[in-house]
Every structure is written in structure tokens, then in C-alpha cells.
Amino acid sequence: MVRTLSLTAEEANAVRTGMGPAENAPPGSELAKDDVFSELRSPRILLQGWAAEQQVLGDGRRQIFRFVLPGDVFGLQMTPHASMANVTAVSAVTHAPLRLSSPLAEEGGPTPVFAKIADILLAEFIRELQNQVVRLGQLSAYERVAHLMLELYFRLDRVGLTKGLTFEMPLSQEILADALGLSAVHTNRVLQKLRSDGLLEIQRNTYCLMDLRKLALIADYGALRRPI
Amino acid sequence: MVRTLSLTAEEANAVRTGMGPAENAPPGSELAKDDVFSELRSPRILLQGWAAEQQVLGDGRRQIFRFVLPGDVFGLQMTPHASMANVTAVSAVTHAPLRLSSPLAEEGGPTPVFAKIADILLAEFIRELQNQVVRLGQLSAYERVAHLMLELYFRLDRVGLTKGLTFEMPLSQEILADALGLSAVHTNRVLQKLRSDGLLEIQRNTYCLMDLRKLALIADYGALRRPI
DNA sequence: CGCCAGCTTGACGAGCTTCAAGGGTTGTGG
DNA sequence: CCACAACCCTTGAAGCTCGTCAAGCTGGCG
């Protein structure tokens, strides 16, 4: 039974040995694509910076499925024909290919330790997609922003990228809006409201969640919260 | 490389031999749950009727992630702690447990054929979740309904549950609304509009898509369409 | 210094929700 | 066989949330 998403020492080592050479990429560059003609690439791990899994519609509208944070794996679920989805850097990033099947067992499929890692990552990925569906389908703009802030906070906290209630978020409000299914203007107004309600402080790219309990209450985050 | 979601004869046979005894359940019954205290159950295959993967919020709001149609597997992605999500029958259903790892290789993990089936199902599942995110995040109510109708049509068509452009959909408008992130009243108005635009005909639970091309254009369905 | 991207604010309108009431259909009990 | 209840669909009216357009502002950078 998978109790937590953290890896054992053995698993962490497996990830380390499976990592290929790191690459840098500027904001806006496409890190992975997923359409009929692209070749199947190895999954990759994001080492620095933020990226976004997104889909662009025919008329230019963009929906971000999920933000990829440092330590996250992306491209794991890419399947031919899946959609016009892609993964794009939203800040300067460093990423590396990640072999999740053992080089020793090429034909025999993944070894148990790699299979378990892939399962853990996939479960996490699905959970985040489901959270996104609930946010977009049921929550008001105010609730939505609170909910996303909490998710980002806890995900960053798990990999040591918070300081107290504070974290760095290199996203413009326009990008935030594309993840939230809101206009940039309204996203801004909601952020103002959260600030005037004493729940959020923002300075440049530094966000501070002033009251996790109140935010979780607003966003009904309890039902979705992973174990801490 | 996975080119299509249809199974080979060998794979279809594997599914058949892995199926346990079928059970019936009335509308509204919970077929699978996914929370901290539930034991890990085997995935199941839906043989008849419709079900919905959903999550209920603290205040009673409900979001449906995805409809489970005959032939679909559910409970595959259920993970402890995942959320308060569950799978609920929306009509009378028949379902059966489905063993996706070979009984011959208990400790060795799944055999290749079972692993491939699980991969195919998982990829399909993720694609549908992503479609749902785009629908809820970017599409207007009118576009959203058109988009969902197309998805349901093509999924049903793949398992032989359409007659021409017509299919049976045992969903109340309220349930439809919970999948679309709309109120039941507005869902009704949008359906009226699609009818008066000559794109949809409804008689009881029988839906007929009068113009797939126009509907696909309205919903920007091309970018998401699976190969036919 | 001036430019550019991103943030902020106001005014207005469209899209959607809510409340409310009426009507059709199915199943149930007198 | 009819009356009634339960459920679902339908429609109107009113109001709120959010989007759009537009303008001004701010800070970083050449």
C-alpha cells in the first residue's frame, strides 16, 4: 500500500542513477510535446524553475493543466494522439531525462523499484488533475485562487522550497489566470481581495499565505489535502 | 508504441480470463470509494449501465470527473489518500472485478500483456481528465455541452452503443450539470439552444447529434479528437 | 531617459445562477 | 381506474459574478 509519496533511499538512488545530462531552457520554450508526429521521448525531471502542462485551443485560448515544480517528473503520461498538449517553461528551467525502466532489464519491462516510482508519480499526477477539475468546475474565483495557492504551497513545502508561509512563484497573473480559467483582470481583483482580507501578501514573486486554516476553509481544501 | 486503444485478440482474451463474477447495482449506489480507510480493491469493469467518478465537497456541491461507460474500467487509479472521490452508479449497472496482473506472476509484478492493458487504460483515463479540464476552464456553456456530447458519442461508438448519430444517455440534466460545472437550469437552456440550432435532438434518454462537423467546430473538438 | 511588460482600476455588459412557478410523465396506493 | 406523489423538464424574472474594453500606473532594463 502506497502510504506516502516520498521515496525510500533505494528509490531515490534509482532516480539518481536513471538521470541523464541536465539541460537549461529559457522561459517560453517547449520542453515536451505530445501529438501525432512527435517521437516518444523519455520522461524528464524538472530540477530548477517552473513549467506548465498546457493545451492551446484553435483560437488561442490556453488552459494550463498543472504546474510542474522542481522535483516533478513530466512527460511520463505523454501518449501519441493524446492531444495537442505540451509542457512549456514559465521561467528559466533546468531539466534532465529520467530513465524509469532499468537499463539491465530492457526487454523484461520495468523492474519493481522503477515500476513503483512510476506508479507513485502517476497517482500524484492524477490527483492533481482531479483537483484541477474540482477547482474549475465547482469553485468560485475567490475559492479557486485560495485552493491553488494552498496546493502550490504544500507541493513546494514537500521539496523544501518554502520559508515558513512564504514561497517564490515566478508566474505572471496572466499565466495564473490561464491555470484558473479566469481572465487576468479578474485574477488580479481576486488577489487584491485576498490581500485586503489579510490572507495573502505579495511582493514581486514572493507570496505569503497568512492563514492556512482560513484559506483551507474557504477553498474546502480539507477534502483534497494529502497527508502531511 | 501505443497506436490505438483497441485491444489485440490476445489482450481481449486476457481481460476475459481476468474477469471475476458480475454484480448488479441500482442507481445511486457507490461502486468504489477512495479514501483513507477503504481497503485497496481490485479494479472493476463496467458491463452495463452508466456510472460517474465524482467528488462531493463539504457543502454538498458535486463535481463529476468522468462518466464510466460500458466497457470502461474504473478503480484502476484509486489510491489511498487520493481524495474523497468515489464511483457511483447513475443508472442500473452490472460490473465485475478485473484482475490486471497475471495470477501466475503474483510476486513478479504484472506480465507484459497486463501491463500494456493497464497502460492503455491509464492513458485513456488521463486524456479524458484533461479534456474535462479544458472544457471547464476554457469553454463557454454552449461549447461545453457540445464538447461533452461529442466525447460521449465517440466513446459509445467505439463499443458499438450508437445507432447512426443516435445514442442512449441515461443522465438527468442535473447530473449532466454536475459534470459540466453548470447549474441544471442553465444546462437545460443550453440544450434548448442546441435543439433550436438544429444540432441536437432529444427524446427521453435518446440523444441524436445532427451535425458532427458543426458541433466539433463549435467545441474546438479537433484538437482533442482521438484518431477514428 | 524612454520603453516594455506586467499590474491596477473603473465602467459596462454578457453569461450564468438563483428563485420561483408550472407542466409532463411515471409509478403507487386507494 | 383514478388520484396523488415524486421526479424531471421547462420557462420567466432578477441579480450577481466574471469578462471585456480602456486607461493609467509601476518597475526593470537597455
Image (cartoon, coloured by chain):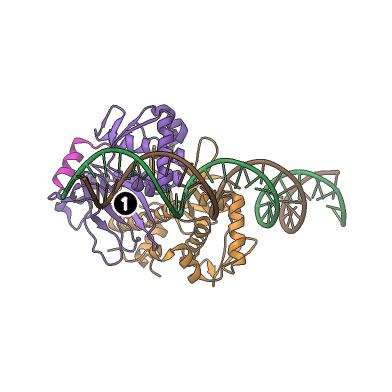
Chain colours: A purple, B orange, C brown, D green
| Residue A54 appears in the picture as rendered | yes
Tell me the quarter of the image containing the C terminus of chain B.
bottom left
**Residue at position x 29%, y 27% in the image:** A164
Query: B13 above or below B172?
Result: below
Which x, y percent locates residue A169?
A: 29, 39
Q: Main secondary structure of the magenta part?
A: helix
Circle 1: element type: strand
**Residue at position x 28%, y 37% in the image:** A204
| Circle 1 chain | A
Q: Nearer the viewer, residue A184 or A159?
A: A184
Where does label 1 land, which residue?
A: A53
Tell me the quarter of the image containing the N terminus of chain B.
bottom left
Q: Nearer the viewer, residue A170 or B226?
A: A170
Query: A112 above or below A206?
Result: below
The answer to whether residue B171 is left or right of residue B100 is: right
Disc 1 marks which amino acid? Glu
Which x, y percent locates residue A96?
A: 17, 49
Q: Nearer the viewer, residue B196 or A1?
A: B196
**Which segment did they paint magenta?**
A5-18
Which x, y percent locates residue A215?
A: 42, 31
The answer to whether residue B66 is left or right of residue C27 is: left
Which x, y percent locates residue B56?
A: 51, 40
